[in-house]
């Protein structure tokens, strides 16, 4: 595509081409669907955001953890005592399942896994 063609399309002197929008979005690392919506080629509904389950499956552990932290920091409940946060809707304590009852603490960035028999003092010395 020539510079003059690009200039005419961007300025509105000629019809904007969807192919150009896609190429520019990709060249600048932008979301192609968002660019097509912004330029009026498709509606937000037509672009269709991925379903929640699909988005959660694609998210990395770090992305999920950051989102949980962001929500926790914004939450008004963070001002409540921890004991009330563990209560369910009827006041019963919600038990963690086996996924959250690990017998060791992994510290991969330190190359160390602490067992339940390691004291805090021993961990501090590591």
Image (cartoon, rainbow, N blue to C red):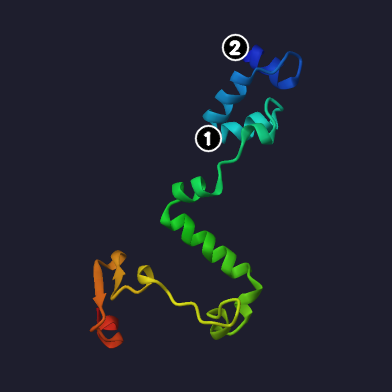
Which residue sits at x=68%, y=25%?
41
User: Which residue is under mark 2?
Assistant: 2
Residue sitting nearer the eye, 21 or 116: 116
Residue 83 at what x, y percent from top left? Answer: 54, 85
User: Which residue is under mark 1?
Assistant: 29
Label 2: element kind: loop
Location of the N terminus by quadrant is top right
Name the quadrant containing residue 6: top right
In the displayed structure, 92 sits above or below 30; it is below
Q: Residues within 10 Å of mark 2 (few under 14, many from 20)?
A: few
Name the quadrant containing residue 22: top right
Name the quadrant containing residue 103: bottom left
In the displayed structure, 74 sits above or below 23; it is below
Q: What is the CA distance from the residue labelled 1 to the residue labelled 2?
A: 21 Å
Labelled disc at residue 91:
none
Which residue sits at x=63%, y=80%?
79
Residue 109 at what x, y percent from top left? Answer: 31, 64
Q: Residues within 10 Å of mark 1 (few under 14, many from 20)?
A: few
In the displayed structure, 53 sits above or below 38; it is below
Q: Residue furthest right?
A: 13
User: Left of 96 or right of it: where is 85?
Assistant: right
Residue sitting nearer the eye, 123 or 106: 106
Q: Nearer the viewer, mark 1 or mark 2?
A: 1
In the displayed structure, 76 sits above or below 45; it is below
The number of numbered badges drawn on the structure is 2
Label 1: element kind: loop
Residue 76 at what x, y percent from top left? Answer: 66, 74
Residue sitting nearer the eye, 3 or 33: 33
Which residue sits at x=60%, y=40%?
49
């Amino acid at each position: 595509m020539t510079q003059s063609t690009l200039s005419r399309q961007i300025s509105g002197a000629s019809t904007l081409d969807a192919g150009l929008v896609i190429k520019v979005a990709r060249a600048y690392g932008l979301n192609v669907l968002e660019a097509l919506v912004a330029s009026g080629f498709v509606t937000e509904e037509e672009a269709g955001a991925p379903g929640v389950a699909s988005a959660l499956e694609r998210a990395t552990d770090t992305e999920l953890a950051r989102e949980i932290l962001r929500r926790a920091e914004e939450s008004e409940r963070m001002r409540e005592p921890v004991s009330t946060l563990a209560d369910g809707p009827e006041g019963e304590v919600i038990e963690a399942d086996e996924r959250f009852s690990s017998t060791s603490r992994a510290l991969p960035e330190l190359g160390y896994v602490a067992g339940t028999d390691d004291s805090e003092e021993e961990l501090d010395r590591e």
